[in-house]
Image (cartoon, helix red, strand yellow):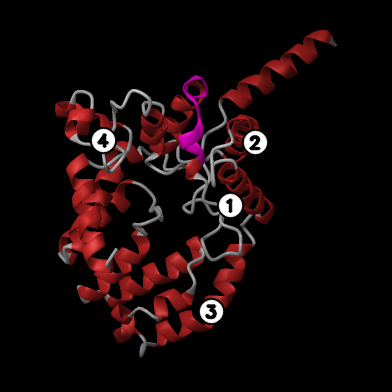
Amino acid sequence: MKIKILVFLLISVVGFSQKKKINEEYDYINNYYQFVYQAHYEYLKEDYQKAYDLLKTAEKNCPLLNQMGIYEPKILAECAVRLGKNNEALDYIEFTLKEYGTKFSYIENDSVFNELKSSKRWKKIKINAEKYFNDYSKRVDFNLRKELNFMKKEDQRVRTNGFDAEGAKIVDSVNIDKLKKIVTDCDCYPNYSVNLVGSYDTDEFDPEISVLVFHINKKRAEYWKPIFLDLIRRGRAPADIYGKLIDSNLRSNGVFQYGIYNNVKKDRIEDFENLDNRRIAVGLPPWQLEKDIYELIRKKYGF
């Protein structure tokens, strides 16, 4: 009997250790993010062919994400329309409605898609849009959304209108313990590319918690560094959280490794000549490209 129990335990341990992680076969760091960043830049410059080609390469390499501030499926839909690929544009519109809970009104109110509105397929998508959203919502963990929203509010409560140092210690400790369980359970750092979390419009709770990364201290960061890097590689976390984790812990000495802060100049970045190599290796865009994208966004949207 003891032998049988030991064999069962051994099989269980081996089976657990060999459990395949989500997106384990993909490498977003080397095969996805850089194509998308360059595509975003070309899109903002209105070179829709280049943007389309780059995004199609990224999509060929890894399943599409819906990164906040980029929204790959939406850009692909727009590029496809502008390039006369209307059926493909409708494919991406339907995809973002089904897979990422995008509200149809967001698409419908964009004049870029006006020429699609007379097609039978557009009308069919419009009829089905509510069903798509309801089906998407069934995959969302609403309790998790509410919990993430509460965690962020607590994080900000002790840092708004004066810094409550003792309160922050307590809140950060509680939030980190919660985050460990959440990350383990969902095999992700919660973000809008993960259906479990939902989209911005799913309900009144905002589950975006990337701000918590800034408040993970140096000691705790050692636990998170390999986890964040692995999640980024598999497209299961915002691509900037590793850089945020490291640089946020370097604020006290004022010299940074990844240059994540917009107001940081070259002279305050360690080994600036190799900065882009470091950034690319953790999923960030090249330093100047990020600044160029920000400037194009500012001009396009008047920020």
Q: Does the magenta stretch mainly form a helix, a strand or a loop?
A: helix
**Crowd tier of the residue under label 1, counting other residues whose Cα lies within 10 Å: few below 14, some 14–19, many 20 or above:** many
Q: In terms of secondary structure, where does tag 4 sit?
A: helix
- Asked whether residue 10 is in view, the answer is yes
Q: Which mark is residue 178?
A: 2
Q: As shown in the figure, which amino acid type bears the numbered disc 4?
A: Ile
Q: Position of residue 23 (x, y in %)?
A: 45, 41
**Residues shaded magenta:** 212-221
Percent position of residue 227, x then y: 48, 29
Chain-order first, disc 3 or disc 4: 3
Q: CA distance from mark 2 to mark 4?
A: 30 Å
Q: Name the one closer to the observer, 117 or 246.
A: 246
What residue is shown with label 3?
128
Quadrant of residue 29 within the rendered picture: top left
Say which quarter of the image contains residue 285: top left
| Mark carried by residue 280 | 4
